[in-house]
Amino acid sequence: ESPVVVVLSGSMEPAFQRGDILFLNNAVEEVGVGDVVVFKIKDRDIPIVHRILKVHTKPDNTVELLTKRDNNRVDDRDL
């Protein structure tokens, strides 16, 4: 995958504006609430840039993240 992402919508304003170029760094081993993450959803070609709202560690130590667009009122449970 490319280490560069272009912001395509205003969903992360004011932190990121449409057209901003993000240079990705996968060197971080852990992420936390407030961090911005880039992820892909099955059957969608465009990466999503959202902020972590909640981190949930399951009993088997897998981690699930609840994210939210900065410019939206609701979280991403629908994704």
Image (cartoon, rainbow, N blue to C red):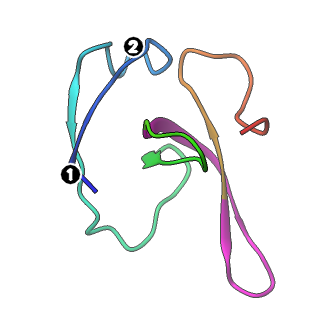
Q: Name the residue tied to disc 2.
A: 14
Q: Please tell me whether mark 1 sits on a helix, a strand or a loop.
A: loop
Residue 37 is covered by the magenta coloring:
no
In this view, the residue in front, 54 or 9, is 9
From the viewer's perspective, is the residue at label 1 or at label 2 nearer? 1
Are the residues tagged 1 and 2 within 8 Å (C-beta)?
no
Q: Please tell me whether mark 2 sits on a helix, a strand or a loop.
A: loop
The picture places residue 78, in percent across and down from the top left corner, at 78, 35
Residue 61 is covered by the magenta coloring:
yes
Q: In the drawing, does residue 70 fall left or right of residue 4?
A: right
- Magenta region: 47-64
Quadrant holding the C terminus = top right
68 w.r.t. 24: above or below: above
Q: Name the residue tied to disc 1.
A: 3
The picture places residue 38, in percent across and down from the top left corner, at 42, 46
Q: Give the residue displayed 50% in from the left and 17% down from the top.
A: 11
